[in-house]
Image (cartoon, rainbow, N blue to C red):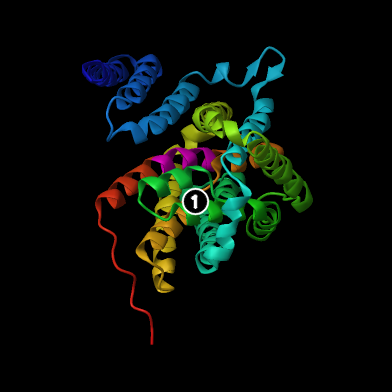
Amino acid sequence: MNIFKLILGLAALCFIAAIGVSVFSGVENSGPFFIVAFIAIAVGFKGFESLKGYTYTAIIFASAVTAMFYPQYFVQWGDFKLSVAIVPLIQLIMFGMGTSMSLQDFKGVVKTPKGVLLGVVSHFIIMPLLGFSLANVGMAAFGFSPEIAAGIILIGCSPNGLASNVISYLAKANLALSITITAVSTLLAPIVTPLLMKLLAGEFVEISVVAMMWDIFKMVILPIGAGLIVNKILKNHAGLFDKIMPSISMFGIAGIIVIITAAGRDSLLTVGLALMFLVLVHNIFGYTLGYWSARLFKMEERDCRTIAIEVGMQNGGLASGLAKGMGKMATVGLAPVIFSSFMNITGSLLATYWKRKPLEAAPPKEA
C-alpha cells in the first residue's frame, strides 16, 4: 500500500511542478509533468479499492494530454497516417464486447420487455434530441462550426457503450437489463444512427445514410458476431478473454483518443472549454432524463438506475470511427472523444454514489 501512496505523492509533486512551469516558463513547457502526473495517478489508484474504478479515467486523461502537447507524434509516422488505425481498433474493441456476450444475453428481451423497450427508446430519443439542442446552442452562443456541432449530434445518435455495463454493475443496478439494452441498441445502430444523423445533422454536414450503415456494420456487427462465435467455440476458455479483453479495449480506446485529439488539437484550442461544457451537460442530462423517464413508467429503482446509465453513456469509439469515415475526424470527431473521457468520470462518480445509497422501493402502481 505504501508504494501506491508514494506514487500518488509523485503525481501531486508533478502537478505542482506543472503549474510552476506553466506560470514561469509557459504552458507549452509543462507537458512532461502533466503527463507523468496522470500516469502516476493511474498507477497509484490501482492500490486502493475505492479508487480502482478511476484508473481507466486517468489513463484517458493521460492520453488526451499527451496528444495535446505532442500532436506531431500521433498524426503521421513517415508515410503512414495513424488515422488508418482507428477502424481496426474499434473492431478489436467490438470483438472484445462480442466475446463477453452470448445469445443468452438476448433472452432479456423476453424476460424484461418493458425495461428493454423503455431503455432503447429513451436512449435513441433523449440523447439525439439533447445533442441537436446543444449543437444549436454551441453554434449560436459559442460560434461552433457546423462540423463541430454535428459531432455533438453524432455522439447523441450513437448506441450504448460497453462501459455502461461496468458502471451498472458498480452502481448495483440491473446488470442483466443493462447488457440486454446495450446489445439491442448496438444491433439497431446500423439502421437507427444513420437515419437520426440524416434527420438531425443533415443541415450541418453531408450525411450518406448507406455509407454510414455500412461503416457501422463493419465496425460493430461483424466483429461482435465474430466475438460471439469465438465465445461459443471456446466457451471453456472464456475466462481468458474476460481477463485480457478489458485491458486491450482500454488501450484501444486510449489509442483512438490520442489519434483524434492530435488531429483536432487546433480546433480544441479554439472551442475546447465551451465544447467540454456542452458535452458534460449532454452527459449529465442524459443520466437525469433517463432516470426520470423510467420513474415515470413506474420502474423499480434498480431498473431506473440502469436506464439512466444506459441513456447517459454512449459508444464514443464508434462515433469517432464514423467521424473518420466521413473524413471529418478533426472536427466531427472531437465531441465523441471529449464525451468518452467525461462519461467515465461522471459514470464512476454516479456508481459510487448509488453503491452507497440503499435501493428505494418501487413506485406504487396505479390502480
Is 37 situated above or below 125? above
Decide: is 11 above or below 263.
Answer: above
Q: Residue 254 location, x and y as percent?
A: 51, 28
Q: Is residue 121 visible?
A: no
Residue at 57% over, 34% down: 238
Q: Is residue 235 left or right of residue 43?
A: right
Q: Is residue 281 among the parts visible in the rendering?
A: yes
**Magenta stretch encompasses residue 93:** no
In the rendered image, the vertical position of residue 302 relative to residue 253, given as above or below: below
Residue 304 image position (x, y, % from top left):
40, 62
Reading the image, the residue beneath label 1 is 138
Which three-letter amino acid code belongs to the residue tagged 1? Answer: Gly
Q: Would you call the spot at circle 1 few (<14 residues within 10 Å), some (14-19), or many (20 or more)? A: many
Q: Which residues are magenta?
A: 335-344
> Magenta-highlighted stretch: main secondary structure?
helix
SS state under label 1? helix
